[in-house]
Image (cartoon, rainbow, N blue to C red):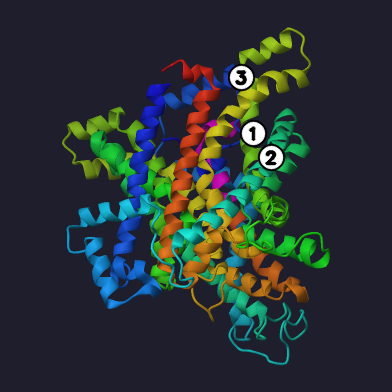
Amino acid sequence: MTRYIARRTLQAVVVLFGVTVITFIILQSLPGGPARVMLGSHYTAAKFAALSRQLGLDRPQVVQYGIWVSHLVRGDFGFSYVHQVPVAQLLVPGVVNSAILGGMSIVEALAVGIPIGVFQARRRGTFRDTALTTISFVFYSMPVFFIGAIAILYLAVRVHIFPVGGVLGVGQSGVSLWPRIYHALLPSFVLASVQMAAWSRYMRSSTLETMVQDYMLNARAKGLTETRAVWLHGFRNALLPIITLLGLSFPALIGGLVVVESVFNYPGLGYLLWQGAQQYDFPVVLAATVVASVASVAGNFLADVLYVVVDPRIRHEG
Amino acid sequence: MKADWKKAFRAEKDDSPSDGSESLRAIALDAAGPVAPTSSTRLIILRRLARDRMAIVAVGIIMIIVGFCYFGPLFWHLSPDATDPLSLVAAPSLHHPLGTDDVGRDVLARLMVGGRISLQVGIIAGLLGTVIGVAYGSVSGYVGGIVDAAMMRIVDAVISIPVLVLLILLSAVIRPNQVLLIVVIALTSWLIPARLIRAEALSLKHREYVLASRVMGARSTRTIVSHILPNAVGTIVVNATFQIADAILLIAYLSFLGLGIPPPAATWGGMLSEGMTFLYQDPWWLIYLPGVSIVLVVVSFNYLGDALRDAFDQRTQHGR
């Protein structure tokens, strides 16, 4: 298992290296170059010259890349053009808010999608199964902002169940957890609705696969009811591939976060990215891109490690 | 690495765990090898497609929407950019059968013109992304070894950047027009076809006919073009269809976020986003019409891809 994790870590590092190289290339191609971009509104000719030297802009590209990465690692993403503060000050609350929203949506999507998938698998080929498959297909093809617009129209505007957007008093310290969750509820439902479609579909086929395994036959043969056989023996095995898919779903989840956060004006990482792109606030956009990519690499990595931890068959293979 | 999340969604075909006889049949079919579509197999595939009712409906919807967008303006003469200051955010009426937006532009006319961007950019970008991915993946898989490893690590890196994030970054650097948008979307969407075709190339390159071609002295390019690709055509066509669906969704996302084709050009995503500014006036026609248009097109392409895969894959022929 150690070997597997070591190999997987190495792979993640290589991918992170690639991600930073790509972002670096884009940074280099920005108007004014990286020093101009990082200084933003703090630009003066003297500071520009100093930072250019500090960033090693007169040195080879490879050295420049190394210096840029060392800034990244220390959390120095430069200054925001628009907000006139270090980008890191914006990123931290953004990441926290996004993590709350994203985490809630994952839990909701799994909590609904997985039971639906098992239900469909057990009633395979019936009308209800086909209907649910069709519904999940439509949800999968729906732009998440369309679902968001409908949700706001009915649940926030016509019936005032949910707040229309934002997080009350964010930025002020001492905002307790409950208002944060309350404001994240409707956006998280919207985000979850799209993922739910995928999870039910995966769970359905994963359960179908386990139902014909020998251990299921054995469970039935020793007299378990079908329900007990499925839930006690089939279910946990059917969940295994879901762990890997959970890791792979991270890039899509982050894309969804960007859209949902902009629909609901929810101040997360995606909202920062969106605002930054509209205002040409490049330090913010680049930093958000790096953080989002690191998050998706990390998610993928954690899922793979979790898989080994959970599944003893792989753990003992070494 | 493993398959992609999205790819997995599409791969979850209703492939029920088969009993013994079926899997024997599958093995028999597999031994015969994949069949490069000659004119007769192409006919068989088309015939299978025609038997799939959902596929017919999907093709029908796509054709209706294409007709609506490209030929609609021949019959509906209001300009998509002409404003009517006397009816702002007006509900559907005789004069404006689908209502007007916030500056009094006719929603019907804008739906038609906006659909063109979704369709032409989406289809071309989807196809271009597939072409890039096929070229990349077939070279990577065919050459193999360290080249393959390096090329695939690049794919791993790019695929870790969420597509939408990468698109937002790129469209902030360049203000897109239609051509740039096609290029940018294609550049972010070649990764999945690259992985799929690489896997195909890896397995196909050890077939006897490929070896024979190499023994006879064919160059790698020729072997790839005339032996690998024709045998991967099913994968390519099915994936291209999904790529188009994804590209249309991405365009909708970008224009909704105000980062696609800049206004006053009409786009479905942009229309919906403008409509959301007036949510308190409850303008259902500004929300549902563009929204439903997007969903119809995307669902149709997704269903078509699903049906195409069934038609190409003999093994799923035992029923859906």
**Badge 3: chain ID:** B
Q: Which mark is residue B19?
A: 3
Residue B200 percent coordinates (x, y): 38, 36
- Seen as rendered, the residue at the extreme top is A222
What is the span of residues highlighted in magenta in the rendered image?
A: B300-320
Which labelled disc corresponds to residue A203?
1
Main SS of the magenta part reads helix
The answer to whether the residues at label 1 and label 2 have Cβ atoms under 8 Å apart is yes
Question: Could you tell me the amino acid type at mark 3?
Answer: Asp
In the rendered view, tell whether residue B230 sits above or below residue B117.
above
Residue B288 at least partly seen:
yes
* Same subunit, tags 2 and 3: no
Residue B301 on the magenta segment = yes
Query: How much space separates mark 1 and mark 2, taking CA atoms?
Result: 8 Å
User: Does B20 sit left or right of B129 as displayed?
Assistant: right
Q: Chain of mark 2?
A: A
Residue located farthest toward the bottom when viewing the structure as drawn: B86
- Pointer 1 indicates a residue of which chain? A
